[in-house]
Amino acid sequence: MHSLEYREKYIKHHLAMKTILSVKRPRCTTRWILMLVLTFMFGLTGVNATYPVDPPSPPQLLSNGDDPKESVEMYIHNSEVMIFAKSYCPYCKRTRRLFDQIMRENANLDVIVNIVDLDSMEGQDGPLIQKALFELTGQRTVPNVFVGGKHVGGNDDMHALHHSGKLLAALEEIASTREL
Ligand SMILES: N[C@@H](CCC(=O)N[C@@H](CS)C(=O)NCC(=O)O)C(=O)O
């Protein structure tokens, strides 16, 4: 509705009106005639007195109607380890391999790793989740990993955490405090 053409029309009308009103003491009838002519020319019937502003766009929802931010929070808080990934992403594959390795080397470690491939989600769900993740963590890339509900980061961060011994410690802590 508020196209460029419409705004241009509005501005032209506004400027012309300003000029007429600022003419020194125009005769009342002349002023009214000019205003009527202008109104006719620019077809201003129904135009708001205020400057037209585009209406705010409605919030974007996932294909199931969920709010992307709430959905991300649900994923994170309902997962012991949550990895947002993409199926073709080499960094994501390295993170998956790291978890496979940890689980293999620690057969008694019982932690559930939840992985969601954003590129395999329906419609625009993947990009919407990625945008919500960026707003939540400041991280644009995948993998985007959460351990015990806390944001850890990407693949490099996961490997750094593992080499420091803190990842295994965090996983053991999660397994030991799990509510049965
Ligand atoms: N240093 C990052 C690199 C991650 C990265 O570059 N991931 C790519 C995919 S392989 C990415 O997210 N690109 C942007 C996008 O897919 O939207 C890490 O260790 O996680």
Image (tube, grey):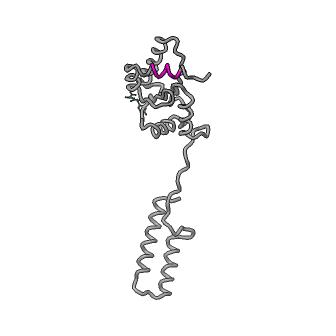
Judge by depth and name the residue closer to the eye, 135 or 43.
135
Above-or-below relation of 2 to 140: below
Residue 39 placement (x, y as % from top left): 51, 74
Q: Quadrant of ligand 1?
A: top left
Residue 121 placement (x, y as % from top left): 54, 31
How many numbered marks does the figure carry?
0
In this rendering, would 11 be left or right of 71?
left
Q: For residue 138, which quarter of the picture? A: top left
Above-or-below relation of 31 to 3: below
Could you tell me which quadrant the C terminus lies in? Answer: top right
State the residue at coordinates (52%, 54%): 56
Residue 120 placement (x, y as % from top left): 53, 29
Residue 47 placement (x, y as % from top left): 54, 68
State the residue at coordinates (54%, 19%): 176
State the residue at coordinates (55%, 44%): 60
Magenta span: 168-174
In this rendering, would 66 be left or right of 82?
right
Above-or-below relation of 26 to 14: below
Magenta segment, prevailing SS (helix, strand or loop): helix
Judge by depth and name the residue closer to the eye, 142 or 69.
69
Residue 172 is inside the magenta segment: yes
Judge by depth and name the residue closer to the eye, 51 or 11.
51
Residue 98 is inside the magenta segment: no
State the residue at coordinates (50%, 57%): 54
